[in-house]
Image (cartoon, grey):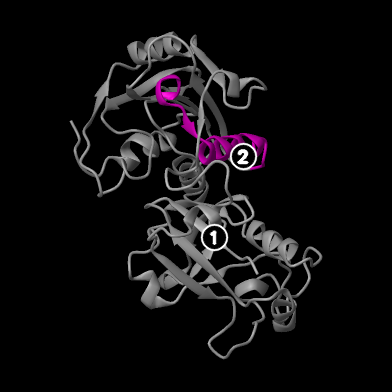
Amino acid sequence: MYDTDFRDLVLINPIGQGAESLKIVSGYATHTMASWHIKEISSKKLSPINVTLIVGMCCFDGISKAVHDGFNSLVQRNGTPHRSNFICQYVVKGAPVHSKLYIWEKGGAPFCAFMGSANYTQSAFSSRRRELMQECDPSKALAYFESIEANTMYCNHAEIEEYVNMTPTHPILSAEDTPLVSLQGKEVEKVTLSLLTKEGKVGFGSGINWGHRRNGTKREPNQMYIPLPVKISRSGFFPLGNEHFSVLTDDGIHLILSVQQDNDKAITTPHSNSLLGVYFRHRMGLANGVFVTKQDLENYGRTDVTFYKLDDEQYVMDFSV
């Protein structure tokens, strides 16, 4: 039985032993966890795998719209070279499923399995929670998975919203209002981060122009990060340790971000540094890949961006003018 440091044991180590696929049953799950897991496998230069997730409690209390959209976004990226594939299914009939089960397959046969209390979420696999996991019989675990799978529907099924209730992104947000309208009058912790350097400039090879290098180094020109001052990175406002967090922008776009680089000095989109740059350039009415000047930011109306913290994994990002 394991009560600490079981994250790699359950989610990573079997790949090094030849496992090629992971099947999961989890009462609750988040797209930020799946995003982190896929990125972690890639970062460790391990062979891509197939991850199949069944979310068990959807038919009982629905699923957050942000989490649902996040799962669909990950599914849409399947087929990307050197990246693990992700399949997500919701239990839509029969009894709700609160189980937590992780089954690894090798050569098409059950290889090892774990069961316990840890949902497929970042918090459950971190030091912030006390959870228990233990090894179990992989063949019996697979049989249980298959019995549950008969009552599921794929998250990207055209009629999924007729079977699963889509709840607001976060209880503090209204389904009818924009994020900023929902936040009016509420006491929500926030920070504002400058998109300029300490000297009040835009840089080459940094910040919003991370993809532009004076020395001619070829990089994707949309690459971008938001500079994160040490004082804020150490304040606990953002999750560290390469954890992923979900962001709803003021104009209704869902992004997955992560604090990266040495000394936790940058916020970017972990699966592709260019996604954030594409978003900001599009928001300012600029062409993809262009060098962004300070004048461009001033013409748009602001040189900073504000984050509102809803909880440890969900934020609102405001770049409105």
**On-image quarter of the N terminus:** top left
User: From what the image shows, is residue 98 above or below residue 246?
Assistant: above
Residue 167 image point, x, y percent: 49, 34
Secondary structure under the numbered disc 2 in the rendered image: helix
On residue 317, the disc is 1
Would you say the residues marked 1 and 2 are in contact, meaning their CB atoms lie under 8 Å apart?
A: no
Residue type at tag 2: Ser
Residue type at tag 1: Met
- Residue 26 falls in which quadrant of the image? top left
- Residue 115 falls in which quadrant of the image? top left
Nearer to the camera, 160 or 149: 160
Decide whether residue 60 is among the magenta residues. yes
Residue of label 2: 73
**On-image quarter of the C terminus:** bottom right
Residue 285 visible in the shown view: yes
| Left or right, residue 279 beside residue 14 | right
Give me the residue at 20% from left, 41% from top: 130
Residue 227 image point, x, y percent: 52, 74
Task: Using the numbered discs, state the Cα–Cα distance from disc 1 to disc 2 in whole angstroms.
Answer: 19 Å
Q: Which residues are magenta?
A: 57-81
Give me the residue at 30% from left, 47% from top: 126
